[in-house]
Image: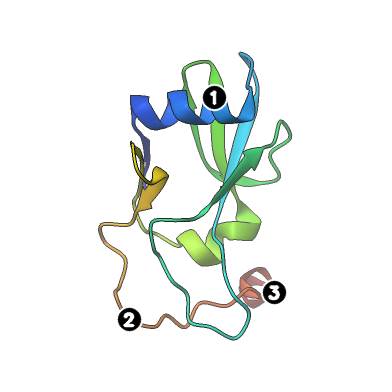
Amino acid sequence: MRLIITDQASQAIIKELALQAGDGVRFFGKQVPGQPVNHDHKQGYAKDNHPVRPIIHVHKDAIDYHINFADAWFFGSHDCLIDYDEAEGVIFTFPDAPDGISSASIDYERFLQ
C-alpha cells in the first residue's frame, strides 16, 4: 500500500482546511451502509492532529497525512493516489482496486482478533 499525494492536492487541502505547519490530515473512505464498497474518486479527508494507530503516514509540505487503522477495511492494500482537478477538486484514484463489489467489512478489526 502506498499513499501518494500530488503537490497540487496537498496545496488544495492546506488551503481548504486552513492548515498550519505541523497539522495533520486523516483520509477515510466514504461508504453508504448496505452498499458495495466503492473506490471512486470522491472520498473523505479532515483535519486530524491526533492519528489513532495509523497504517500509513506521509509528511508533505509540513503536513502529516495519514490513514488510521479503523479505515484499513476500505483502503486495504490498495495504492491510493490523491490528486487535484480544477473541476472536481481533490480526487482519489485507486489504480489497483477491483472494479466490482468487494466483501470488505467495517468490522475488520474484530475479524483480526
- Residue 4, image x, y percentages: 35, 38
Residue on which disc 3 sits: 110
Residue depicted at x 57% and y 70%? 31
Choose the circle earlier in sequence order: 3 or 1: 1
Task: State the residue lying farthest toward the left.
Answer: 95
Could you tell me residue 78's position as x and y percent?
A: 36, 58
The residue carrying pointer 1 sits among few (fewer than 14), some (14 to 19) or many (20 or more) residues within 10 Å by Cα, namely many
Q: Residues within 10 Å of mark 2 (few under 14, many from 20)?
A: few
**In this figure, which residue is indicated by the disc labeled 2?**
100
In this view, 88 is above or below 95: above
Find residue 113 and name its label: none
Distance from Cα at disc 2 to Cα at disc 3: 24 Å
**Residue 29, image x and y in percent?**
54, 59
Position of residue 101 in the picture relative to residue 59 (left or right) = left
- Mark 3 vs mark 1, foreground winner is 1
The amino acid beneath tag 1 is Ile
Whether 24 is drawn above or below 2: the answer is above
User: Do the numbered discs 2 and 3 sit on residues whose CB atoms are within 8 Å?
Assistant: no
Secondary structure at numbered mark 3: helix
